[in-house]
Structure formats: structure tokens, C-alpha cells
Image (spheres, helix red, strand yellow):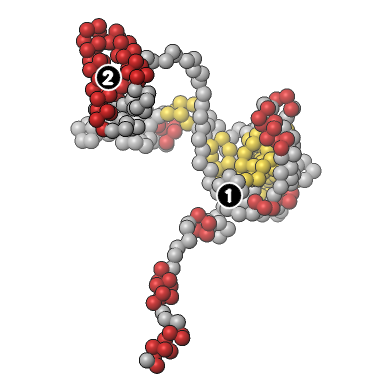
Amino acid sequence: LSPCSLAPSGLQALICNLIVTTVRFRTSLGRGVSAGGMAGAMAYQQLNAKLQGLRIAPSRTVSRMRAAPAPVAQRRCRLVVQARTFEVGVGVFGTKAGMTQMFTASGSAARPATVIAIEPGNIVTQVKTRDTDGYDAVQVGYRIKREDKVNKPERGHLSKHNAPPMRHLREFKLLDGVENYTPGQQLMISEMFKEGDLVDVAGTSTGKGFQGSIKRWGMARGNMTHGSKSKRQHGSIGMCATPSRVFPGLKMAGQMGNKRIKTRKLRVIKVDQELNAIVLHGSVPGKPGNLLEITPAKIVGKNFKYQRHLTRPVRNIKAEVSEELTPEPEAAAEAVEA
């Protein structure tokens, strides 16, 4: 029996639990489980009404006797939780247009290149600070759409920060430098990147569906002849007796692709202001038409350091102790004279 949390004394709490438990036990024996549960719930309500003046809270065992609520219609929903890391600076959004090849200045070699189109948007919609939100971040909107396509809460949020209706709203977490941005500011691709810069590109990879372990993880297959019983099968997934389970994280068949991927340190080949596009050396995640995030390349140790902001300042205990033990000059002089 668990004690009551708000009981005036332990004796009254014990009596309360004994009476309710006895009523529940007797009614369940005489009338069955379902009838006993209903009678016990009625007895509990009557007893609770009588003991309102004593302010006795019901215990955990008594709360189970309450009738179950009516079933509520549920709808399927998908919750996606992504832990975003800190970025070196604010980036821009773009749409993957496709891949091509570009020759070097001498024309001796061709390089694979990805063309990313910058559609109308890339407007700062909100600036978050540590004082107001607990962390520094800049929210950017992309792809302007009609006002009737935006719900009222989002419409009020955008109008509050002098921004038009946007299709995509994402934020870039920063360690510092948010004071350089204001709501409603237009981010220009030509001002943020130039030829030769290194950038990180993040997006959703192309979905491959449910695939086996050979295509998904590059595993080797078995023999195709001589009576082989394991041609493209996965094989053993664990021990039988010890530990008699499958270890978490085992590479097996499953969904391949359709997840967020970031390609790091791609070099900018060209920034076209007239076409409002940027050309990168290499491939980026997703198919043509995919939404991409382009940020300055984060190189830990060169242009990014976690210790400067994320770690707490360490107290210099030795210096504090030495200051306390070191006497003042006047007190030291008096001690010497004495």
C-alpha cells in the first residue's frame, strides 16, 4: 500500500487505503471482475467525496479502478526529430538543377559539376538570441508562395518579422554573429560565396526503397553454383546461446536512402549573378528539384572551435587559493617588525 501524498497523518492515509482496497477485493469476488471494477469505482468516488475535507489524495493502486475513457479517433502522423549542429555562418537555400561537366582553363581536363539554382527567397525571417530563445540562430525562408497557402500562425509569424509568405523555413544555429542579421534582410548568393570557396551542402538523398544487404551495405554474395543455399542471403545475425540475441546496429536489409545527408568541402567553381545560380565541383544529395542547404564549410580546428563557447569556464582554484594565503604587504611588514 502506497501512502497518500497529502494526508494529514499517516494513520488516516493507511485507513483510507485499507477501506478502498477491501471494497475493491470484496466486490471483485462477489460480482466478477467487470462488475467488481464498477462497484469499486463507485465506492471510491463516495469515499473520496466524504474525505474531501481531509485532503487525502488517491494512491496509485486506487487510480487504476477508474473506468477507461472512450476511444478517440487517431490519425497517423510522422514526427521527425533532427539534431542540428552549429554552423560556421548563415547559409542559403537552393534547388538542384542537374549535373554537367566543366573544363579547366587550359581545357586539358573535365570536372563533374552540379548546378544549383537560387529561386526567389532566402530572406531572414527571424533572429534568435540566447537571451530570448536560449541559443543563437538565424531563420531563413525560401520559395515565396501565395498568402492563402499559409496558415494563420505562420502568416502572423512572417508578418511580424516583415517577411513574405514562404514555403520552407529553416534555421542556422550559430555560435556568434547573429547581430549582423535583421529580419527581412535579403541574402545574396554573390555576396556570401565566391569562386574557390569551400561549402557544405545538405539535402535528402534519393530513396532506393527496401533493399538487401548486398546493395545497401556492399556485402559479398555466396556461390551461385555447386548447390549453394546462400546466394544473396544475409547469413548469420548472431550467436545462438550466448548472448542469445541480436546486437543493436547490425547491418541488415531495410530502407535505403531518403535521409538527410551532408556533403562536405565542395569547391565553388562559378557564381552566376545573371542566372542566379551557383556551380559546385562534385555531386550533391538528391534528384534534380531537391531542396539543398548551402553553408560555409566547417573545418574543426581552423575556422570552428567548440571549446570557446560550448565548455564552461574553468575556475583557477590554484590562483584563488594563493591569493587567499598570500598576506597583504602591510600585514607582512607588521609581522616582520613584530
Q: Are marks 1 and 2 in contact (CB under 8 Å)?
A: no
* Residue 116 image-quadrant placement: top right
**Relative image position of residue 99 (x, y in whole percent):** 65, 38
Decide which of 31, 269 is in the foreground and name it: 31
* Residue 231 image-quadrant placement: top left
Q: Is residue 131 above or below residue 238?
A: below
The crowding category of the residue bearing disc 2, from other C-alpha atoms within 10 Å (few below 14, some 14 to 19, many at least 20), is many
Residue 119 in sight from this viewpoint? no
Using the image, tell me which numbered label, if any, was put on residue 130.
1
* Residue 294 image-quadrant placement: top right
In the picture as drawn, the residue positioned furthest to the top comes out as: 31
- In the image, what residue occupies the spot 49% across and 58% down? 307
Q: Is residue 191 left or right of residue 208?
A: right
Q: In 3D space, how far apart are the residues under numbered discs 1 and 2 (Cα atoms)? A: 52 Å
**Relative image position of residue 155 (x, y in whole percent):** 70, 31
Quarter in which the N terminus is drawn: top left
The crowding category of the residue bearing disc 1, from other C-alpha atoms within 10 Å (few below 14, some 14 to 19, many at least 20), is few
